[in-house]
Image (tube, grey):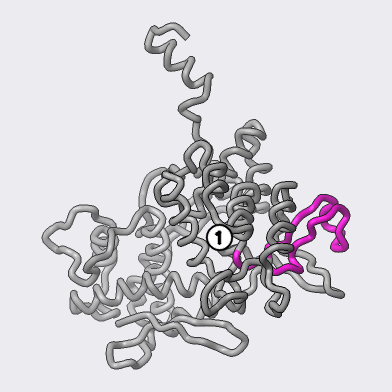
Amino acid sequence: MRVQQIERKGGLRSWTILWPEGTVHVEADRFLQQYDGSGTQRTYAYLLVDHLRWLERECLAFSAVQLLDLERYMGIVGAEVRMPLGEPWRVGKRPYGRSALSAAASCVIGFYLHQASLGDNVELGEKLDGTRLPSRVDRRRSLLGHVKTAMPANPLAPKGPHRRHPKMLPDGARERLLETVNSARDRLLVTWLADGGLRIGELCGLHLVDLHLRENAACGECRSPHLHVCHRPDNPNRAEAKTKHPWRTEHGTVTGGLIKRVSPAMVHTYFDYLTSEYPGGARHGMLLVQLHGADTGQPWAPVGARRMLGRAGKRAGLGTVKPHAFRHTFTSAVLDAADGNLLIARDAGGWASAATVDEVYGHVDVHDPAFDAALRTVWGEPK
């Protein structure tokens, strides 16, 4: 079995699962159609095909699957040590991490609940369709959390508290990269990732009309220079913003979307790039373009930006630099500058929830003077 991407009118895409002979896997396709054209559909397609391959290996029909089988499956795909069962249907793939396990649990339980709603393995569906009391985080995430008496419970989800530790940029990485990159476009990329906290899909998906780089712009939604991150699934370079805030274009002016402030350095690199390298005949209207090769002037894809940063990082002696490290460093710096105010860090980085910011970035800096002084006191050393 394999995942098949389907090109649709207007540049839209969908994903489904095919049998080896090329026919559609009916049950999987029926489940995935609920998320038609979304990033969730793509993610669930690749997670679900792993599970379906495992079912084939185990010779399990949907009607015969038990909760114990699903728990065994989740244990196998997340195991870092190959036990006697092994992973022959996932040769060459790494074990799922914590985030992937959570997504796989949601995908698998959703698939079997969907099957149960159609009358297949209803008993398993009843075991999976559980609830729990709302936690403090649940109440924080919902304006109406105080009236909720129960939340969906996923028995397949990883257990226990989880705190992620994001990988930050090395000290001085921005300056060293700016000295290393070879074009105004690449300097813009480094500067906008560092000062804007943008995801690479958001940055590569920007159009020129999204940029309101002067004060009191016509949109009237922000007095300072800013940009609008708009989700466009039909971008020719396949770059998509993760957030899907509603937006529209009215009389040539973009309003809505995710509004992010722009620094003076971002404005400077923009005009440097636009006046020195941006092709005058480009009709696609996107910000970042290819500078070399047969596709010169065409929109620059996220994979090209990642490769450029990887090469520049190695030339600068930083190793492989990944775009998301800029976002981690930006959000952590905003959180420190805002004295730990999660709401400011959430809005500056465009996070959906302040709880996510707390989970990912709410750590004590091991180099913080107060942290150092506390340890030295415990150790009985002079401060």
Q: Which residues are magenta?
A: 204-229
Report x, y in % for residue 77.
Answer: 27, 61
Q: In the figure, 276 relative to 123: above or below?
A: above
x 48%, y 67%: residue: 303
Q: Is residue 115 left or right of residue 41?
A: left
Q: Is residue 25 left or right of residue 185?
A: left
Kind of residue indicated by mark 1:
Ile
Q: In the figure, 239 relative to 140: above or below?
A: below
The quarter of the rendered structure image containing the N terminus is bottom left
x 70%, y 51%: residue: 266
Determine whether the residue tagged by mark 1 lies in a helix, strand or loop: helix
Residue 223 colored in magenta in the image: yes
Report x, y in % for residue 374.
Answer: 47, 16
**Residue 5, image quadrant:** bottom left
Mark 1 Cα shell of 10 Å, populated few (<14), some (14-19), many (≥20): many
Report x, y in % for residue 334.
Answer: 63, 39
Residue position marked by numbered label 1 in the rendering: 200
